[in-house]
Image (cartoon, rainbow, N blue to C red):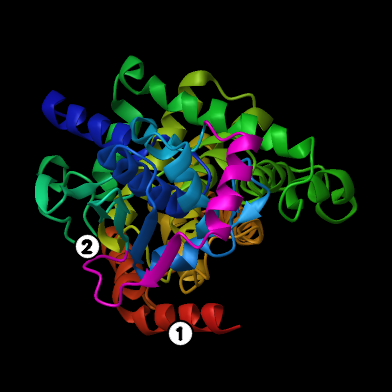
């Protein structure tokens, strides 16, 4: 692989695999509010937000780190009170109990107004209007969680750039057009010193899992499987992977103040692309090089799928990330490119259609389904079994199979997405 292409892929991974504290949809809102507050130069007297449906869906029921609270209002208030835009997806890392108390007061004063933007140009769209002292500021994030497309004060444009086309990454002009062969070749042949940075994903997400296992977060799925599940799951690699992966999700969705390594703007996707691979590598005593290449294969497969799916959709992100994890598991099992392709096909045949009904503690249950299916799909592939083109949406070509999946999630499930949001907001 040419060095220039290799460097472009490395740059892509480094942009898409980054630390995040808290669910990235309310965090993106807090980030946009923090930037508006900084531009205004003082605490806003009033904040109006116009948000795409997917942002609202993913922020309604999720814990906000360090607050013991759920939902957008506290994320907005804290973005204004203590948020720092320079922290990016860790914008809320300076939250304190005192700040939470101030945030509760700010909310009670009726300063925040959240509205659905029915004509949003992207499924990921945050439009913030803040006013104070006779001045007004508008900040807009669109297309990606940290992608500011407009900063405006008192009608004067300070910063502006074209919005991202739905389904592209945060810097589409520089991104290579990935395919599965390219993903595999890069992961298995890139010089180790150029890709070893991916081990930070292991460090962060394993630390989050271990943190959750010491407390009570979300629905405690990780600790439940670990402490009470041996009778049902056994002391097996599948049980270990479910425990660690769901525990990290428990912590994140339960509002723990711990960073995780995200993938394509999603912490849960980062966890799911990381922890099954890390868990299995620990079980088999894999070398650092084996783990590094498996993690790169998993994360880059996930990034590849998200390139055509889009940042947010009606398709649960665990489908994407657990498909990536299958690739990494196959590699650790000693499989080659054909086995990886077979594993991907097995995943698409199984989990296509799992809906996203927002970020919330029960995401750990969906993730555990993805983890067990990833292990099963990898095992089948290693035994020479793969779903064929005579079955369902699977094609002989793995890239076509992936695009069959993403076209369903991106296009055909739009009506599902709207109905899910309607149900969630009308309960």
Residues drawn in magenta = 94-123
**Sequence-earlier tag: 1 or 2:** 2
For the point 53% across and 52% down, the residue is 106
Residue 101 covered by magenta stretch: yes
Q: Which residue is mark 1?
A: 419
How far across and how far down the image is residue 143, in percent?
25, 56
Give the farthest residue toward the top: 193
Relative vertical location of residue 128 with respect to residue 173 in this rendering, above or below: below
For the point 39% across and 49% down, the residue is 28
Lateral position of residue 214 relative to residue 38, left or right? right
Relative vertical location of residue 75 with respect to residue 81 in this rendering, above or below: below
How far across and how far down the image is residue 405, in percent?
36, 68
| Other residues around mark 2 within 10 Å, as few (<14) / some (14–19) / many (≥20) | many
Lateral position of residue 56 relative to residue 278, left or right? left
Residue 98 covered by magenta stretch: yes
Q: Secondary structure at mark 1?
A: helix
Quarter-of-image position of residue 102: top right
How far across and how far down the image is residue 317, in percent?
46, 59
Lateral position of residue 108 relative to residue 315, left or right? right
| Other residues around mark 1 within 10 Å, as few (<14) / some (14–19) / many (≥20) | some
Q: Nearer the viewer, residue 403 or 10?
A: 10
For the point 65% across and 41% down, the residue is 256
Task: Give the quarter of the figure containing the N terminus.
Answer: top left
Relative vertical location of residue 163 with respect to residue 259 in this rendering, above or below: below
Q: Are marks 1 and 2 in contact (CB under 8 Å)?
A: no
Q: Nearer the viewer, residue 26 or 242?
A: 26
Q: Which residue is mark 2?
A: 166
Gap between marks 1 and 2 measured at Cα:
21 Å
């Amino acid at each position: 692989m040419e060095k220039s292409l290799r460097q472009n892929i490395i740059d892509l991974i480094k942009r898409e695999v980054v630390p995040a504290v808290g669910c990235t949809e309310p965090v993106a809102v807090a980030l946009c509010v923090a930037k508006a507050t900084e531009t205004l130069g003082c605490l806003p007297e009033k904040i109006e937000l116009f948000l795409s449906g997917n942002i609202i869906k993913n922020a309604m029921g999720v814990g906000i780190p360090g607050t013991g609270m759920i939902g957008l209002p506290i994320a907005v208030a804290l973005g204004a009170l203590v948020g720092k835009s320079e922290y990016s997806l860790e914008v809320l890392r300076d939250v304190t109990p005192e700040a939470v108390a101030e945030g509760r007061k700010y909310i009670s004063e009726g300063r925040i107004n959240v509205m659905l933007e029915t004509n949003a140009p992207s499924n990921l769209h945050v439009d913030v209007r803040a006013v104070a002292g006779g001045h007004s500021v508008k900040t807009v994030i669109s297309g990606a969680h940290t992608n500011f497309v407009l900063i405006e004060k008192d009608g004067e444009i300070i910063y502006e750039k074209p919005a991202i086309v739905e389904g592209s990454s945060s810097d589409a002009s520089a991104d290579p057009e990935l395919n599965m062969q390219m993903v595999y070749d890069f992961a298995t042949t890139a010089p180790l010193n150029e890709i070893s940075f991916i081990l930070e994903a292991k460090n962060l997400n394993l630390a989050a899992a271990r943190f959750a296992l010491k407390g009570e977060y979300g629905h405690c799925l990780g600790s439940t499987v670990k402490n009470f599940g041996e009778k049902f799951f056994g002391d097996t690699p599948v049980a270990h992977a479910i425990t660690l992966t769901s525990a990290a999700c428990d912590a994140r969705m339960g509002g723990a103040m711990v960073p995780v390594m995200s993938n394509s703007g999603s912490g849960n996707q980062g966890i799911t692309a990381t922890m099954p691979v890390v868990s299995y590598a620990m079980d088999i005593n894999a070398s650092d090089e084996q783990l590094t290449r498996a993690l790169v294969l998993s994360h880059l497969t996930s990034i590849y799928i998200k390139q055509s799916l889009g940042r947010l959709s009606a398709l649960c992100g665990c489908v994407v990330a657990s498909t990536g994890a299958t690739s990494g598991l196959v590699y650790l099992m000693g499989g080659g490119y054909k086995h990886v392709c077979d594993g991907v096909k097995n995943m698409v045949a199984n989990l296509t259609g799992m809906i996203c009904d927002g970020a919330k503690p029960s995401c750990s249950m969906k993730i555990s389904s993805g983890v067990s299916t990833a292990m099963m799909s990898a095992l089948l592939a290693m035994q020479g079994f793969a779903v064929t083109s005579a079955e369902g949406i699977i094609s002989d070509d793995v890239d076509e199979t992936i695009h069959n999946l993403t076209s369903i999630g991106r296009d055909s499930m739009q009506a599902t997405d709207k109905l899910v949001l309607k149900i969630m907001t009308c309960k």
